[in-house]
């Protein structure tokens, strides 16, 4: 079993892309075992560095096997391997043997750290004692010749830190057969970050003290006692956080334990079927330790292959929202091991996606405004703003599908997941999909806001394509297209019927004139399904804009029903009937007006436009200001509304000229 795990890991890592394209910088020190670099050993390269520094010093290590122990007592040191599978640092040491002739652990590990601001990247770090030992041995230990049994599964450390405060380990393999393989220890102020790493060992083989975060890591356990351990006994806020991590191991291995005060957070983690049904537990120490803060073991969206155990259920503290769990939070905002670029124009996908997680409400939806301003995901929120944003999390009153809210975030997070493979983005998107399913009325329509049903927010809303955006997301899930194939298949049995109900609502709300289907209104009463008023200047009317999105949605289906086909035909005929030819709608400068600009209709023989609002009975365009009174001409309403609204547009043009023609040809060939 052990060899199988080893071969799988090495094969996977040998084919991955990390490290292979590294471009060496002139200032980097190069280590090569064949003598082609500046040094042949890693330790000689470390020793060559000045004792003090204010910036990171990079030691680039070429492919090779380096049989040496590493000692780093200097700050700002980076060890960067050329290739994770082929850049190996190997030592063989049993802690029980080492301690017989040494006063402490300095030197017990393959990599031993006392410096701070250390980065390890693209390295395989092995302590091979347990893998190579032929069996347990008995040794004489100490001046009095005390005998000691050294087990092949005893303490064997690949990495051990002492007073290191900041450590980053990226894309590394850290392996031993025994316990305490990865031992970043500094209960006072240690802050340790592991990303994309594989860690393997025996009991407590990942055992940080202080603050630790592991993201997208693989843990392989060869002990029935425990895989992970934590010591957070010095400060109540210290914690170990594991996000998007996967566990494997020998049959019956247990997840974790503690015997001092500890705090565990496991988010979006995956457990194997052969893991024991044992929650992270307290192991009694001898003499017993006083546990000051009680058991603090928290899970969110963690699942076991073959079915969850009862203790896998979500149980985050009531005071903590899932969107607050970020790298900076893990270290009490004292450190961020992966800060984002400061330039707004170059905000990364992860920065924007992480910001979206901050705004997501408990019910899965998103607001469109924060502190009366449009939500801007490229902004770095202040701590005060985060506290203010948090106040609306529980009641979720501002969650909406208006102005592309919620559907926009779902689509962005799906793309972010495919780019980063970070499961938290997929989980947030799935939570957003669940919000859409929950918010749908039995009639098949959607309110503009959910759960805020005040005023016109409760109305079935086609305005700004709100309902159609929701339906397109759910249909993408049902069809498993546009990236939504990553969504859990369990959503399909919910999304497909929801789409069917939505289509039913569309067909029921299409306005009929003289027995012929026309188009749709921007909003409808949720109970009567009759055209309804929204804002003062948005009276019941036929919509020249929103109706386009509805028709396009109906045309996306390969096998539309006769009712759906008749609906499309009727709408297109209506668009052709009410078009306005020979005019264009333009914005002009108007220094004497309140806004300094105006919007007017001007003759243009080559132009065709449509009005935003048409009378329900006679199809005449009309206009309305904030007084709520219908006007026949645009010039009759106030400048603020005249210049601040899109009263005419070319919305149906492409639908008629291209999309409908293509649909008609496809439909005729059935």
Image (cartoon, rainbow, N blue to C red):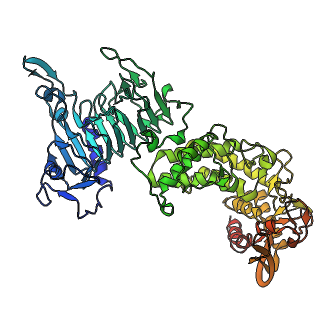
Query: Who is closer to the viewer here, 297 or 651?
Result: 297
Number of numbered discs on residues? 0
Query: Would residue 485 be seen by someone viewing this image from the given angle?
Result: no
> Which percent across, then down, holds residue 641?
80, 65
Furthest-bottom residue in this view: 605
Q: Is residue 85 above or below residue 131?
A: below
The image quarter in which residue 293 lies:
top left
Query: Who is closer to the viewer here, 554 or 648?
Result: 648
Q: Is residue 251 above or below residue 575?
A: above
> Which percent across, then down, holds residue 212?
37, 37
Query: Who is closer to the viewer here, 531 or 629?
Result: 629
Q: Is residue 225 left or right of residue 519?
A: left
Q: Residue at x 89, y 70 (%)?
A: 636
> Which percent across, then down, holds residue 50?
18, 52
> Which percent across, then down, holds residue 117?
30, 46
The image quarter in which residue 582 lies:
bottom right
The image quarter in which residue 408 lies:
bottom right
Q: Is residue 594 left or right of residue 363?
A: right
Query: Would residue 96 be seen by someone viewing this image from the given angle?
Result: yes
Furthest-top residue in this view: 287
Q: State the quadrant of the C terminus.
A: bottom right
Q: Is residue 329 left or right of residue 123?
A: right
Q: Residue at x 22, y 50 (%)?
A: 52
């Amino acid at each position: 079993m052990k060899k199988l795990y080893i071969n799988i890991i090495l094969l996977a890592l040998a084919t991955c892309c990390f490290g292979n394209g590294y471009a060496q910088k002139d200032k980097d020190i190069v280590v090569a075992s064949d003598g082609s670099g500046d040094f042949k050993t890693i330790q000689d390269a470390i020793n060559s560095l000045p004792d003090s520094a204010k910036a990171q010093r990079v030691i680039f290590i070429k492919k090779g096997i380096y049989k040496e122990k590493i000692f780093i007592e200097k700050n700002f040191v980076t060890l960067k391997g050329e290739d994770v599978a082929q850049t190996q640092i190997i030592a063989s040491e049993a802690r029980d043997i080492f301690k017989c002739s040494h006063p402490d652990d300095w030197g017990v590990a393959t990599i031993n750290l006392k410096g701070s601001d250390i980065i390890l990247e693209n390295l395989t770090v092995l302590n091979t004692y347990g893998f190579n030992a032929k069996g347990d041995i008995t040794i004489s230990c100490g001046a009095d010749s005390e005998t000691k049994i050294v087990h092949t599964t005893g303490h064997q450390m690949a990495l051990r830190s002492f007073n290191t405060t900041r450590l980053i380990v990226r894309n590394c393999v850290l392996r031993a057969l025994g316990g305490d393989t990865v031992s970043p220890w500094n209960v006072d102020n240690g802050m340790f970050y592991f990303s994309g790493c594989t860690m393997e060992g025996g009991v407590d083989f990942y055992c940080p003290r202080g603050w630790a975060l592991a993201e997208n890591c693989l843990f392989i356990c060869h002990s029935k006692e425990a895989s992970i351990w934590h010591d957070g006994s010095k400060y109540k806020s210290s914690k170990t956080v594991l996000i998007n991590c996967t566990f494997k191991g020998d049959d019956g291995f247990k997840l974790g334990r503690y015997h001092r005060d500890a705090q565990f957070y496991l988010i979006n983690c995956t457990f194997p079927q052969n893991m024991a049904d044992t929650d992270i537990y307290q192991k009694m120490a001898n003499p017993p330790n006083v546990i000051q803060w009680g058991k603090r073991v928290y899970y969110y969206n963690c699942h076991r292959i073959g079915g969850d155990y009862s203790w896998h259920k979500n149980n985050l503290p009531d005071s903590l929202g899932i969107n607050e769990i970020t790298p900076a939070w893990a270290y009490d905002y004292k450190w961020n091991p992966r800060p984002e670029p400061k330039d707004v124009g170059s905000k990364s996908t992860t920065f924007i996606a992480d910001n979206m997680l901050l705004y997501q409400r408990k019910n899965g939806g998103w607001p469109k405004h924060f502190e009366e301003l449009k939500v801007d995901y490229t902004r770095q929120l202040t701590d005060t703003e985060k506290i203010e944003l948090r106040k609306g999390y529980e009641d979720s009153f501002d969650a909406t599908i208006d102005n592309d809210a919620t559907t926009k975030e779902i689509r962005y997070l799906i793309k972010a997941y495919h780019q980063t493979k970070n499961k938290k983005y997929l989980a947030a998107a799935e939570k957003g999909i669940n919000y859409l399913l929950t918010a749908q009325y039995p009639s098949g329509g959607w309110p503009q806001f959910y759960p805020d049903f005040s005023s016109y927010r409760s109305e079935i809303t086609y305005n700004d394509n709100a309902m159609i955006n929701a339906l397109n997301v759910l249909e993408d899930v049902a069809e498993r297209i546009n990236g939504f194939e990553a969504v859990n298949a369990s959503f399909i049995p919910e999304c497909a019927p929801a789409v069917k109900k939505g289509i039913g609502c569309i067909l029921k709300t299409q306005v009929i004139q003289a027995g012929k289907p026309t188009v749709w209104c921007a909003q409808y009463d949720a109970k009567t399904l009759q055209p309804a008023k929204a804002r003062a200047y948005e009276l019941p009317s036929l919509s020249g804009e929103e109706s386009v999105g509805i028709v396009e949605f109906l045309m996306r289906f390969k096998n539309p029903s006769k009712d759906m086909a008749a609906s499309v035909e009727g709408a297109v005929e209506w668009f052709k009937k009410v078009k306005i030819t020979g005019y264009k709608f333009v914005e002009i400068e108007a220094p004497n007006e309140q806004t300094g600009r105006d919007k007017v209709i001007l003759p243009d023989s080559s132009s065709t436009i449509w009005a935003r609002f048409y009378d329900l009975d006679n199809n005449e365009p009309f206009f309305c200001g904030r007084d709520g009174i219908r006007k026949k001409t645009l010039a009759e309403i106030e400048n603020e509304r005249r210049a601040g609204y899109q009263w005419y547009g070319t919305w149906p043009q492409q639908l008629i000229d291209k999309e409908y023609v293509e649909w008609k040809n496809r439909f005729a060939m059935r």
